[in-house]
Image (spheres, helix red, strand yellow):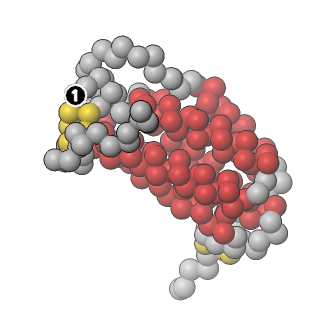
């Protein structure tokens, strides 16, 4: 018999964290890993639109890390979990920094804020950057509500949003899309 995707256990607005504790579907922990999942989906779109094998490898690496973050965020920190969960490492943040530096080597110096646009993949990458910032804000909110969030997750999401900003510029650059500087009305 095929595995059924529906369980009917969430029909009344609650869901289970890894570890079995049930929480409302609007719980900040659910909101945080749901936003990480949304981010992961946008990165899939960026990859599909970009058509660059190297960037595709980078994005698949990041998508894998986002599944790791989602698993950690979906786990009740007060319950012992029987399954082995993946983990995040400092080297994952360093990987982002290395790739930011690599892309910045070929990008023109920024002299103003940049209006998102110019290329569909680059624009979608900017959307992903905004979703990443939202995931980071939700995780900070969890910390403020005394929910357990590993510090490395906050660091990774912060650096990932920087990476996605630079990647959006880089995608525009390799597709010869013009950057649109913001010119404030004075």
Which residue does the image show at 29% across and 23% down from the upper left? Answer: 19
Q: Position of residue 41 (x, y in %)?
A: 53, 52
Answer with left or right where residue 97 lies relative to residue 37: right
Q: Decide: few, some or many residues near mark 1? Use Cα within 10 Å; few <14, some 14-19, many ≥20.
A: few
Answer with left or right where residue 167 lies relative to residue 71: right
Q: Position of residue 168 (x, y in %)?
A: 67, 59
Q: Position of residue 143 (x, y in %)?
A: 31, 36
Decide which of 9, 43 is in the foreground and name it: 9
Q: Quadrant of the N terminus?
A: top left
Q: Position of residue 133 (x, y in %)?
A: 47, 52
Above or below, 133 against 172 in this view is: above
Q: Which of the 4 quarters of the picture holds residue 173? A: bottom right
Above or below, 120 against 166 in this view is: below
Decide which of 5, 138 is in the foreground and name it: 5
Whether residue 42 is visible, yes or no, is yes
Q: Which of the 4 quarters of the picture holds residue 119? A: bottom right
């Amino acid at each position: 018999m095929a595995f059924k995707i529906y369980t009917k256990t969430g029909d009344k607005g609650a869901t289970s964290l890894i570890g079995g504790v049930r929480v409302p579907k609007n719980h900040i922990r659910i909101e945080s890993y749901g936003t990480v999942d949304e981010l992961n989906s946008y990165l899939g779109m960026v990859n599909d639109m970009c058509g660059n094998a190297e960037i595709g490898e980078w994005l698949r690496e990041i998508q894998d890390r986002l599944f790791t973050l989602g698993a950690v965020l979906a786990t009740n920190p007060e319950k012992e979990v029987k399954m082995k969960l993946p983990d995040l490492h400092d080297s994952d943040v360093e990987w982002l920094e290395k790739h930011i530096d690599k892309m910045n080597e070929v990008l023109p110096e920024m002299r103003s804020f940049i209006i998102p646009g110019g290329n569909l993949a680059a624009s979608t990458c900017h959307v992903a950057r905004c979703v990443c910032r939202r995931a980071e804000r939700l995780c900070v909110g969890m910390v403020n509500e005394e929910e357990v969030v590993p510090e490395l997750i906050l660091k990774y999401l912060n650096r990932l949003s920087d990476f996605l900003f630079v990647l959006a510029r880089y995608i525009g650059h390799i597709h010869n899309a013009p950057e649109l500087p913001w010119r404030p009305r004075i």
